[in-house]
Structures are given as C-alpha cells and as structure tokens.
Image (cartoon, rainbow, N blue to C red):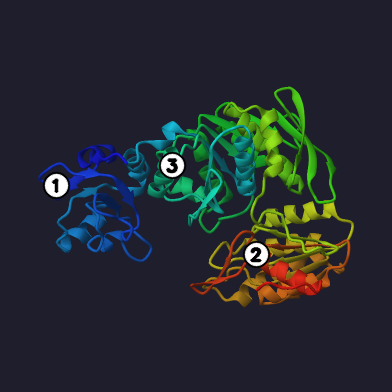
Amino acid sequence: MAKVSLENLAEIAGARVENAPESSLSVSAISLDSNAVKSGAMFAALPGTRVHGATFAHASDASAVLTDDAGWDILRETGFERPVLVVERVRDILGDVAAEIYGHPTEHLTVIGVTGTSGKTTTTYLLESGLTAAGCAVGLIGTTGTRIKGEDVPTSLTTPEAPKLQELFADMVSRGVTHVVMEVSSHALVLGRVDGTKFAAAGFTNLSQDHLDFHPTMEDYFEAKAILFDRAEKAVVCIDDEWGQKMTQRAHSPVTVGVHNTSADCTARLDSVTESGAQDITVRIGGQDISTRIPLPGAFNIANTALATALADSVGIDPKVFLQGLDAARVPGRMERVSVGQPFVAVVDYAHKPAAVAAALDSLREQVDGRIGVVVGAGGDRDHSKRPLMGAEAATRADLVIITDDNPRTEDPAAIRAAVKQGAESVIDGAATDIREVASRAQAIADLVAWAEPGDAIIVVGKGHEVGQIIGETTHHFDDREEVAFALARREGKEVKE
C-alpha cells in the first residue's frame, strides 16, 4: 500500500495540524476502530452516541489522529502528543481522505451501486452472476457481506464505513477485480460512507416505508437515496412506483426500467413458471427480445432482473451474454426455498418491511393453489410505525399468520408482538384468517410447518440470511433456514442434524 504524507492529507481534509511532527510523517492506512489501528496508520476519532472516539486514541497504536474540535479538546486535556488533524466534521471529509490513502481504487474499477428499499441484494447477486458469465472479475458488497471473485469476506454493515470500504476496494484491485456491484443504503449516503467512491452506474429499485426511525419523512428518505444519482456517471431507474418516476426527474439522463410500465427503455414479462418456482421471462432491451430463465420466484424478481440487465448494459456488457449467466444466481435468504422432500413449498425471506412482506406473500400466491402460512415479527429499537402495517399486510394475504419475535433488542418483545397483532386483527373483519401469537421463534416455525398440508406454501419472513437473534444486547445463534429444515425433517421423520 502506498504511503501518503500527513501534509497532503491535511490539505485534502482542509484540516489544521496540531502536534505537528518534526519530520515528515506518512500514513499507510486509516480506521475507525482504535483496536485495529497499527503503527503507520491513522485513527479517525468520531463523536459517538455515548462517548467520543478520541477517548480511545491514547490506547491505540495510531501514528496520527483525525478528529474534530471536541476530539482535540479531549486529546489536549490528556496530554496526547502524536500528530492530530482537526476538522469541523470528520464524516464530511473521511471518504476523500480514505480514498487518497488507499490510492483512489475505484478509479481502477467499474463500480455499480444499487439503492432502494427492496431488491438491492437480489439485484446485486444477479449482477454478480451475469457479469461473471460475461468474463468479468466481480466483487460484491452488501447486506450478506462481501464477496471477492466468489470468495466470502465477512463485513458488518450493508455499506461499510468509508475507511473499510476504500480498503476493500484496494484489496479488490490487488486481486484482479474489474467490476464491483454494491448495495448503497440511505444511511451510507447520508453518513458519507461512499464519499470518495467513483460510481460508473447507479440503479434504483423502489421505495417503501422503512428506516423512518432514521429519516423523519418518506421525502427525506427519498432525498437520501437521490444522493447516489447526483454522483453516478449513469443512472438506471425502475419506474414501476411513484418514487421511481420521481427519481427520473432527479437523475441525469436515466435509462428507465419497468415491468408494469411498458413505456420504459427496458421491460420484462413473465412467460411461464416451472414447478420449482423458476421463471421463464423475456427481457426487451435495445430493441431486442431476449428469453431467459431465472431461478428466483416472484414478480418482483422479474423487475430486479430487468434492472440488473439494464445496469450491465449501461457499463458495456452484452445483455444476451449477461442474461445467459443468471441461471447460476443464488441469493441467500431471499425467497430461499428449503426442502427435505415435503409435499408443500417452504421459503425463508428477508422481508422486514410492509411492502416487502406483501410482495413475498403475493409471489407465493402466484405459485401455489393451496393455502399460505407465514411467520412474521418486527425488530425492536426500530421504526415503530411499520409494525401494525406488517401485521396487516400478512393478514390480508395469508390463511395463517403466526406472530413471533424477530430481533427484540432492548424492547419488550410482547409489546412489539402486540403492535404487529393489532395490525393483523384490524384487517381480517370476520375473515377466516387464523392469527396466532407464539413468542418463541423456533416454536412458531415448528407450528407453521406442522400446519402445512400438500399443495400449501409457508414462508418465514424477517431475518433471511441472518444467523443471529438479538435479545437485549446479546446475539444468540438463530438461522431461520436451519429451523425450517429441522422442523421439516422432524415432520417427515427424517434424521435431524443438530
């Protein structure tokens, strides 16, 4: 990794230098984690919700610190003697500083960013599969972690903080990656995590209620997403909802995508559905119709496929070659089928917002003639307003709704369940929908599996690929896919591997 002089970084950041070194000092890395900083690296000390990061600078091995005035006050009072760069707001310049330290890696990559409420993960996995088939070396960054040319690299955030993100990009460049597909969350855009990143193209899936604990209004949520389109060289926007249509007014010369809106530049239609749930579709792009099969069920995945195809086309990939590569796409925890040979469909999905729950259940209704059962809950310490809405969407569409705990975190789990249940009960109006409340998520899944009959479909929503359940401040191992498989195996009288 190249080294960058402290003087150069101060100039980029517009920072004043405190405890200026007597001789030249170079920086080779940067991190927000004081424990991860080594000699020769810079510690970025940000204000936290409980304590300022500068409190931990003394114990770190950092050769220099980047912080704000409040952080400098803490360091000065404790006699900190190493060089310090002081700026008004660290986040405003952190991405650019990190990009400089790691050699501006996205100048050497074709980066495609995908934003929106639902469909980001699936779209990025479709892009990874199709781009790989087209001969690209692909890196993927998102909710399920990071993948570099098919190899998993765990990360903790949908969009990592700027220092880690630029470090990942640099690692990808060194390993021969040519294209990166990444989910770009609204949090990441507002908090500057993708500052310093050059986007070749940006895609918009849709917008529905989510993260209103972070964004005051849906308009504010939309504006956060729009930041990506102010920066990307090319824009591809799905116009099947009103927010997508609004984004076309913000984005520069966007390519439009639609399933319901046939006036779009790129459209897609369903031709048939296989017994396994795979879909034969036709994508129309650039005046040509291309038929392909995608292994993922659900109408929304037709839209995701169209978006992915148009994004690939925008960066010079042949759509026909791209679409041929989608038969290998697998998306962890997104309409992921679990089967031990049972005579009904069992699916796990990440849906954790009202519109996503509705879409998941609608897709199952299209696939089967029997009944639909769902296990649903809502996360604690998050947007309270969506809880009854999730219950309502589930009860409107399912024959059985089992309300259980998701990640209650520090909230009372019973209160969360009550809010979801209230929403479910508000819409049934004498209908035959069976609504139950089962606190234990494992028991709720077991009850759902026991209820199913041949020809039915059951789905567990909320956690998808996650392998932990957060109760209080402790994360316990829990994987919906494992629990569904266990329950199915018990039901079918097969050996259960604990």
* Residue toward you, 54 or 152: 152
Q: Classify residue 498 as left or right of residue 18.
A: right
**Residue assigned mark 1:** 20
Q: Classify residue 439 as left or right of residue 399.
A: left
Q: Classify residue 85 as left or right of residue 137.
A: left
Which quadrant of the figure contains the N terminus?
A: top left
Q: Amino acid at mark 2?
A: Arg
Q: Position of residue 263 (x, y in %)?
A: 74, 29
Element on which disc 1 rests: loop
The CA span between labels 1 and 3 is 30 Å
Q: Quadrant of residue 256?
A: top right
Residue at the image position 16 percent from the left and 62 percent from the top: 77
Q: Nearer the viewer, mark 1 or mark 2?
A: 1
Visible in this render: residue 436?
yes
**Residue assigned mark 3:** 169
Q: Give whichever of discs 1 and 3 has the lower sequence position.
A: 1
Give the tally of numbered discs: 3
Q: Residues within 10 Å of mark 3 (few under 14, many from 20)?
A: many
Does residue 98 lie above or below 386 as drawn? above
Q: Nearer the viewer, mark 1 or mark 3?
A: 3
**Residue assigned mark 2:** 387
Q: Amino acid at mark 1?
A: Ala
Q: Position of residue 434 (x, y in %)?
A: 82, 71
Does residue 68 lie above or below 23 as drawn? below
Residue at the image position 60 percent from the left and 75 percent from the top: 413
* Residue toward you, 198 or 208: 198
Q: Are marks 1 and 3 in contact (CB under 8 Å)?
A: no
Q: Residues within 10 Å of mark 1 (few under 14, many from 20)?
A: some
Q: Position of residue 218 (x, y in %)?
A: 58, 49
Element on which disc 3 rests: helix
Q: Amino acid at mark 3?
A: Phe
Q: Give whichever of discs 1 and 2 has the lower sequence position.
A: 1
